[in-house]
Amino acid sequence: MNEKPKIAIFKFTGCAGCQLEFLHLEEIFLDILELFDISYWVMVKRDNDETGWDISLVEGGISTPEEIEEIKQIRMKTKFLVAFGDCAIGGCIPSIRNWTPQLDAESQVYRDTSVIQSTKVFGIGEYVKVDAILKGCPAHRDTIVELLKSALLEIRPRLRQHPVCVECKFRDNACLITSKKMACMGPVTSAGCGAICPSLGRECEGCFGPMSNPNTSALASIFKDLGFNEKDIKRKFRKYAGMSPEFRKEAGH
Amino acid sequence: MNSYNIEKKDMNILLDRFLEDYKVFGPTRPGADSTFDEITSIKQLHLDYTSTVLPPKKFFHPPKETLFSFELKNDKFTTKESIQDKKILILGIHPCDVHAILKLDKFFSTDFSDTYYQNRRKNTVLVAINCVEPSEHSFCSSMGTGPYLDEGYDILLTDIGTKYLVEIGSKTGQKLVEGVNLRKATETDFHEKERRLKLMEKKIKKFMNTTWLPRIARENLDHEVWLDLGEHGGVDGSFPCLSCGSCSLVCPTCYCYDVYDTMDLSLISGTRNRELDSCQLLEYGEVALGDNFRRDRKDRIRHWMLCKFGAAAGGKNSSCVGCGRCIRVCPSKIDLTEVAKVIRGGKQR
Amino acid sequence: MNEYSPNLAVIKKVRKETHDTNTYTLEFSDKKLQKSFSPAPGQFMMLSLFGIGESAISLSGTSNNGSVTTTIRNVGSVTNAVLRLKEGDFIGMRGPYGNGWPLERAEGKNVLIVVGGMGIVPLRGVVNYIKNNRKKFGDLEIIYGARTPDDMLFRYEFEKWKQIKNTRLDLTVDELPIETTSKCKIGLVTSCFPSMKTHHKNAIVLVCGPEIMMRYAAKCLETIGFKDQQIYLSLERRMKCGIGKCGHCQIGLKYVCKDGPVFNYADIKPFIHPL
Amino acid sequence: MGEINIDVNYLARVEGRGALHVRIAKDGKVKDLKFRIYEPPRFFESFLIGRRYDELMELTSRICGICPVAHQITALRAVENALGVEPSQQTKDLRKLLAISAHIQSNVLSMYFLSLPDLMGYESIIPMTKDHLHIVKRGLKLKKLGNDITDLIGGRAVHPVTAVVNGFTALPSKNKLQVTRKRLKEAKQDAYDTVDLFSEIEIPDFKRKCEHMAMSDPKEYAINRGRFKSTEGLNVDEMNYRNYISEEQKSYSTALHSHVKNRDSFMVGPLPRVNINFNQLSSDAKDATKRSGVKFPNFNPFISHLARAIELVHNIDESIEIIDRVPLKKERDEITCKSGFGAAITEAPRGSLYHSYELDNNGIVRKADIVPPTAHNALNVERDINEFVKNILDLPLDEITLKCEMLIRAYDPCISCSTH
Ligand SMILES: Cc1cc2nc3c(=O)[nH]c(=O)nc-3n(C[C@H](O)[C@H](O)[C@H](O)COP(=O)(O)OP(=O)(O)OC[C@H]3O[C@@H](n4cnc5c(N)ncnc54)[C@H](O)[C@@H]3O)c2cc1C
Ligand code: SF4
Ligand code: SF4
Ligand code: SF4
C-alpha cells in the first residue's frame, strides 16, 4: 500500500466504549496516526472526509430508520467494514429490550412516544455485509491492533473464537463453576479479553459474545444443577448476545 | 543414594539452601486449587496441598511462550532465539506429576528434539513429595504413577509425622543437601514412610482398569458413549461436553500447541510464539478452505479421551497419569474413568 | 540446532501456473545447507513469512544443482503473501519433513497415479523420478482431474510426460468453459476409471487430492479389485510444527507430518471420515 | 443584518450524536433554538425492569463508554440505599479512587482531545501532533494514567468489572498501587502545566449567572457521596431528589431536559463543583488556582476547562492520599435482598448523575429512574447559547457556529448518557 489506508470510525446505537478503547491505545496512538489516515471520526475530528474509506470501524447497533440508511451509505463507501464491538455485532445490552414490545419500552421512558423513531435494535449485519467482527463489550484493544496490523499485511487477523476457559486456564485460575459453584458464562463465551473477570474473582458474564459452536444447553443444565432457576439462566443468556443465533434459544425465544 | 530426615519445623533451612542457587517454585495454597508460584519464604509453602490447577508442565512447556523474535531489514530477516536458561527448582511435586514430566521428556526428545523444552528442563531441579492425602479425583495407583515415586526426582520428600524423610535421587540432589546439617535417615523413618503410603493407597477412591485399554478404545470408535458425551445426556451424572478445552489445558501430559506470529504496526519486527492448544476446540481441526476434520463435538472428545487412554498418536507419551485434574476442572462433570468403564462394556448410561 | 528456526532461502524463479497458483524455484542462502539438501518426492517443507506464519508446502520438484520448486495456491494468509513475492525475495524455509512416496516399494510394479487439483504437486516429483529411472518401473498411468482446464498445473509438461515410455495421461475436468480449445473430458477422476489401463495385479496406486476425492477414489479402486494395501494416499492436515510436536495433524495413532504425509490406505482407513 | 441560521447537523468532538439549530431574526432576536439530541435511545429504564439488583452495575455501565465508572458506582449506591447496606471505609476509599481515575481520564479527554483543538485553532488533535507534539503527548500520558488506574482497581479501563454491591471482587496489589503512586507524583507537574495551559489560553468573555449544582460534603471534595447543593441555596438529600428536580420531554430531542421544580434550568459539572466545593480542594489545587489568576465562584461556562485542570491537580493529590491510607484487607459480607427504594447521586466527570431503583423481595428491579449530567445540563446549554450568541452576532457565520460549538463542548456533553 502506497497511500496510508483511510480509516473511519462511526457510532450508532451504543455507548462509545469501543471508540474509547481505541483511544486507550495511548502508547501507540501516534504510530497509528503515522500509519493510517484517520479521515472520519466525529468524536475526535471536526473536519471529516466523507468520500470513502479503506476500513470503517462501526460501533453501535442499528435502531432507527435513519441508521439503516446511514449504514447502507457507509457500506457503499467502504472497502472493509468492521462490526466494532458487540453492539454492532448483535445489539449487545440494549438488545435486552427486544423482548419487550417496542411501544411498551418507549412509553416506560417517554411521555410522548409519537416523536420517538426507534425500532428494535439489531447488529449492522442485519442490513449490510460485514467483513470482520471485533467481539467484546468493549472490544479489546489488542484485537483492534491485530486487526489493523492484518489490514496492513493484507492477511486475516488472528482472532480466536474458543472459549474464555482457555485464557482462564492460561492464568492458572481454578474453575469458578466447579470450585465456587458460580454461574460462569466462560464455557460458551468467546475469548479475547484475557479472562479478566474470573481472574478477579467474578464470573464471566459473556461480554465477548458466543464462542464458536457453544454448547449452551449443556451449560444451562449445569447452571440448573448449581441451583439457578430458569429466570436466572434466561437473564444470563439475554444480556450481551441474546439475539445471536447461538444464545437465542437459552435467551428465551 | 543417601537418605536423611529433617524436622518439619526446620524445613526453612533446606529452603534457604535451595534459594541460594535457584529460583524456587512450590505450591502456595492448601487444597486442590493450589498453584505453583515463586517461593521466597517458608510461610508461602503449602506442601500439604492435594493438587494444583496447572501442573508443573507450565515451567517447561508454558501456556504461552515466544520462540524467537525477528526483524525484517532490506527484505532480509534476522532472528533472535529466546532461550530460557534460568535455573529453577520446583519444590513439592507429586509423583503423578513427576511421571508426567518423564513422559514429556521422552516426547520432546524423540525424533526431533524441542530446544525450548529441553533447555528449560535441563535447568530445573525436581524436589518431589510423596502424596499422603489423595485428592478425591486422583487414581494414580491405577496408572502406576503413585502414590510412591521411585524415579525421576533429584530429591524426594515424604511426610512421616513431625519429620520429612529426605531421599536423594541424583548428584544434583546430593550436592544440594551437602552442607545442610541433616541427620541420616533411620530404619524407623522408612517403616513410617511405608506405613503411611500404604494407608494413603487405601484412601484412593478412584480406579481405572488399564488392561488393553488402548486397544479397547480403538475398537470402540463407534461406541454410543461418544455421542452421549458430545451431544446427549453425558455419562453417569455428567452433562454433555462444552468443548471448553479445560481438561486438556490442565492435563500434565497434553502438549498440543498452536504457533502464530506477532508483528508490530511498523511491520519491521515481531515474534513467533506458541500457545497451548486443545483438540477439544473447534478450530484445532481446521484445514485450508474451511474444512474441519473434527467438526463434531463427539469427534473432539473422542480424540481427547483416546489420547488419554494411550490410543492416539501421542501414544504412551501423552497418556494419562491419573492426577485427576481433568475430572476436577470439568464443568460438565465428565470423568474419563467412567468413560473407560463404559467402553469396556461394564456400565451403560 | 533448533529445528524451529527457519533458514534463509531466496526465490530464484517464479512461474505462473494458474490465476491463483505459482511455482517457485528456491535455494537456501547458506551454501553448505544447500549442498546437503536432498529431499525425496512427496516430502514437504515448512515455509515461513515472518509476521504472517508458517505453512506446510510440498516439493514439486528438485533440480541437479539442489534447488527445489514448490507450487503454491493462494488459500489463506501465508499462501496469499507468498503469491505476492518476486524473484530475489527472501523466505524462511526448513525441512524436508515427512516420509515421501514409497518409491522403492513401487519398483518393478505398474504405477497408477490418481490426482485431483493441487494433488499433482507432490506427485510431479514421482513422474520425473520414474522418467529418470524408467527401467525400474512398469507402466505409468496418470489420471488427473481439475476444476477447469485452466486450473491444471504443469500443463507445459504434459507433452513431455506423454513421451515417457509406456505412459498414459488421462485428463478430466469438472466443467469446460464454452470458449475453449481444450479437449478435456468432463467428469470426476473416478469417471476415468472404466477406461483405466492399469490392472490391480502387480500395481501400486498413488493418490493425492482433496480428502473427499481420495476417499471416493479409494473406494472405487476397492470395487475394481485393488487391495487397501496397494493404495497410498498423501494426506493434508493443518501443521503448526511439521516435526510431530504440535499435535494438530494427528490422525489416529499417526502423525501426518512424521509418519506421513503418505499413508497406506489400510492403516488410516478407520480414521479418515467415513463417506 | 439579515436572518442568521446556525446549523450544526452533527456536533463533532463530543460523545454521541447531537446537533444545534439556531434561528436569529433580522432584529437580532433568537427566534428558535434547539440543542437537538438525536442519539437513538436505548431504553435502559425499560429493560432494567426485571433484572436483578446485582446486575445493575454491569448493565448501567453500558450507558456510557466514557463514564462507565460513574454509572456503576451510582447504581451500586442506589442499590445499597435500597437494601440498607453501608459499605466499609475501604470500599468507599477504593470506589473514590476508581471514580477519580475516571475523572482524570474523562476530563483529560475533554480538555486535550475534544476542546483544546478549538482553542488552539485546529480541527482536531491529529494535526496538532505536528506543531505541538509535547502537548499531545502530555494529554496522552495523563489520559493513560487515568485509564491505567481504572484498569488496576476495576480490572478494565472501559466497563470495569470488580466493583460490586458492598465491595470489590478483587483488590489491587500493594506493589502495583505503589507503582501507580509514583506515576501520580510524576504527573503532578503535567497537571500544573495543564492549569497553566488553560489559564493562559484565550477564551470568550461570557458570563451568565445561573444556578450551579453539585454534590457537596464538608469533609472531602465530593464525588461519590454528599448532599446535592446549589448556588441558590438548594440542599437536598439524594433520596429526595425527585421532590426538587423534574424533567420534560422536548419533541426535537431524545434526551429529557431537567429543571429545578418551579424554577429554571441549572448547570452541573466541573465548574459548579469548583464553585461550590472550592474549600475542599487540596492545598496544591488551591495554590494552582491562585496562580492562574482566576477567581471562583465563576459563572463563565468556558472556565469549565480550567476547573477541570484544577480538579486534575486535586484528583492526583487525593489519589495519593487514598493509596497511602487504604489497608487492602480482604472483606466482603454477604447481603440479603429485600424490597425497597434506593436513590443515589454521584459526580460523574461531566456533572451530577442520579439513579434510583425500586426492588422487590427477590431483588428484582420494578422501576428504574436515571438522570445523567447531560440531561441535567441540556436546558442550561440552550439558555447559555441563547445569551451567548447575541454577543457574537457581528462575527462571520462560520465563527459564530464554531463559538457556539465551543460553548457546548465546554460542557463536555455525553450524549449517549443523556438518552440512555
Ligand atoms: C503435507 C502438506 C503438503 C502441502 N503442500 C502444499 C503445496 O504444495 N501447495 C499448497 O499450496 N499447499 C500445500 N499444502 C496446504 C497448505 O499447507 C495450506 O493450504 C496452508 O497451510 C494454508 O496456509 P495459509 O496461511 O495460507 O492459510 P490460512 O490463513 O491458515 O487459512 C487457512 C484457512 O482459513 C481460511 N481463510 C483464509 N483467509 C480467510 C479469510 N480472509 N476469511 C475467512 N477465512 C479465511 C481458508 O479458507 C482456510 O480454510 C500442504 C499441506 C500439507 C499438510
Ligand atoms: S471474563 Fe467474560 S464478562 Fe469478563 S471481560 Fe471477559 S468475556 Fe467479558
Ligand atoms: S487425563 Fe486427566 S487425570 Fe489423566 S493426567 Fe490428564 S488431567 Fe490428569
Ligand atoms: S473440561 Fe469437560 S466440558 Fe470442557 S472440554 Fe473437557 S470434557 Fe468437555
Image: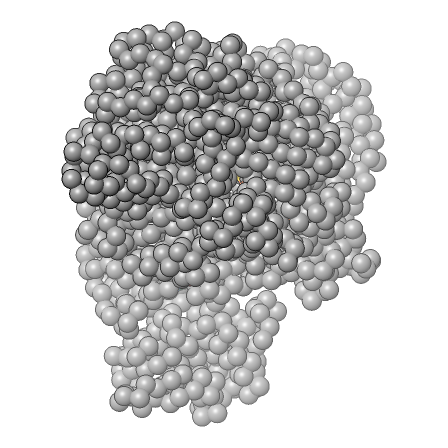
* In the depicted structure, whether residue A235 falls above or below residue C255: above
In the rendered image, the vertical position of residue A145 relative to residue D213, given as above or below? below
Q: Residue D43 appears at what percent x and percent y?
A: 53, 45
Decide if residue A159 is in sight here.
no
> Residue drawn 48% across and 79% down?
C204
Left or right: A4 as drawn, with respect to B60: left
- Please name the residue shown 76% across and 42% down the image: A227
Q: Where is residue A67 in the image (x, y as percent from the top left)?
A: 40, 55
Q: Does residue B230 appear anywhere in the picture? A: yes
Q: Residue D140: x percent and y percent?
A: 31, 29
Q: Residue at x 43, y 33 (%)?
A: D374
Nearest the eye: A212 or C58: A212
Height in image: D15 above or below C63?
above
Q: Nearer the viewer, residue A132 or B127?
A: A132
D161 or B267, which lies in front? D161
User: Which quadrant holds residue C67?
Assistant: bottom left
Quarter of the figure with residue A111: top right
Q: In this view, does A242 lie above or below D419?
A: below
Residue D209 vs residue A180: left or right? left
Is residue D299 toward the left or the right of residue C106 in the image? left
Furthest residue in direction bottom, as rendered:
C195
Give me the residue at 19% from left, 56% from top: C88
Q: Quadrant of the N terminus of chain D?
A: top left
Q: Where is residue B98 in the image (x, y as percent from the top left)?
A: 63, 36
Q: How many marks?
A: 0
The quarter of the picture where residue C60 lies is bottom left
